[in-house]
Image: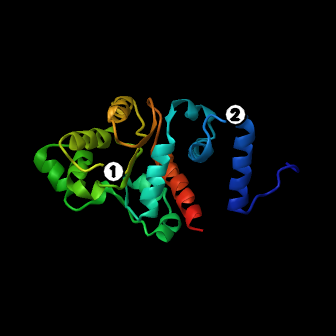
Amino acid sequence: MERLQPQKDPAAIERRSFAIIDAEAGDPKPFSGLCWEVARRLVHTTADFSILDNLIISDAAVLAGVTALREGRPVFTDTRMALAGVPERRLTPLGVKAACLLTLPGVAERAQKAGITQSRAAVELAGDLLENAILAVGNAPTTLIALIQYLREGGKAPALVIGMPVGFVNAAESKELLLEETGLHSIVIRGRRGGSPLAAATVNALAEIALRGRA
């Protein structure tokens, strides 16, 4: 117990955590440059290096997300939990607004009337608002499926889709559909793993990069 010194500075704790991750990842890193900054944030969120085995990320996708944030494009999430994981202090300096798709006016009514899930109704209602935005999906595969249907019907594409729904039913399959969409930038955790904390962590990592460029 005497060796355990209380850590009171969150920023210092984060820096130390990142240093540990860098050291344990070894060289060469699984990813490089800005991709590693995002990947490292995901390891930090889960304390699990194996999450990197299923991570699909590219320089182009990271740049698309950072550019969207620097241009003040909105961030949409599939759940309130993911939205809660993105603090305003990271987005406000960029002039970025964030919202949960499920809270858009008329979602429940449209879903009930059309006999569809609220996630699909939300994508349909969002419509052109998604153009050049960031869509972070950490829970609902139906959101990804609805987005892909919307795009194939001629809808406007987001600048970046963060595809990390978690679960046993359609989660892995929806991510593969997303990866098949050519010309659409995405950051994806393949398979069943994912979750709102990881989707939010990805947005946070991108925002940190975008803010650094503004300094």
In the rendered image, is residue 11 in sight? yes
Amino acid found under the numbered disc labelled 2: Pro
Q: Name the residue furthest left.
A: 113
Residue depicted at 58% across the width and 42% down the height: 39
In depth, the one of 103 and 179 nearer the eye is 179
Whole-percent x and y of residue 130? 29, 54
Q: Is 55 drawn above or below residue 4 in the view shown?
A: above
Whole-percent x and y of residue 106? 19, 59
In the rendered image, is residue 163 in sight? no
User: Which residue does the numbered mark 1 point to in the structure image?
Assistant: 158
User: Which residue does the numbered mark 2 point to in the structure image?
Assistant: 28
Whole-percent x and y of residue 214? 55, 67
Tag 2 secondary structure: loop
- Indicate the colouring scheme: rainbow
Q: Dot 2, crowdedness within 10 Å: few (<14), some or many (≥20)?
A: few
Q: Name the residue furthest right.
A: 2
Residue depicted at 47% across the width and 34% down the height: 193
Q: How many marks?
A: 2
Q: Label 2 vs label 1: CA separation?
A: 32 Å
Give the quarter of the figure containing the C terminus.
Answer: bottom right
Residue depicted at 44% across the width and 29% down the height: 191
Residue depicted at 37% across the width and 30% down the height: 176
In depth, the one of 139 and 208 nearer the eye is 208
Tag of residue 34: none
Q: Is 120 drawn above or below residue 106 in the view shown?
A: above
In this rendering, position of residue 101 left or right of residue 84 = left
In this rendering, position of residue 14 left or right of residue 127 = right
Q: Dot 1, crowdedness within 10 Å: few (<14), some or many (≥20)?
A: many
Amino acid found under the numbered disc labelled 1: Pro
* Location of residue 179 by image quarter: top left
Which is nearer the N-term, disc 2 or disc 1? 2
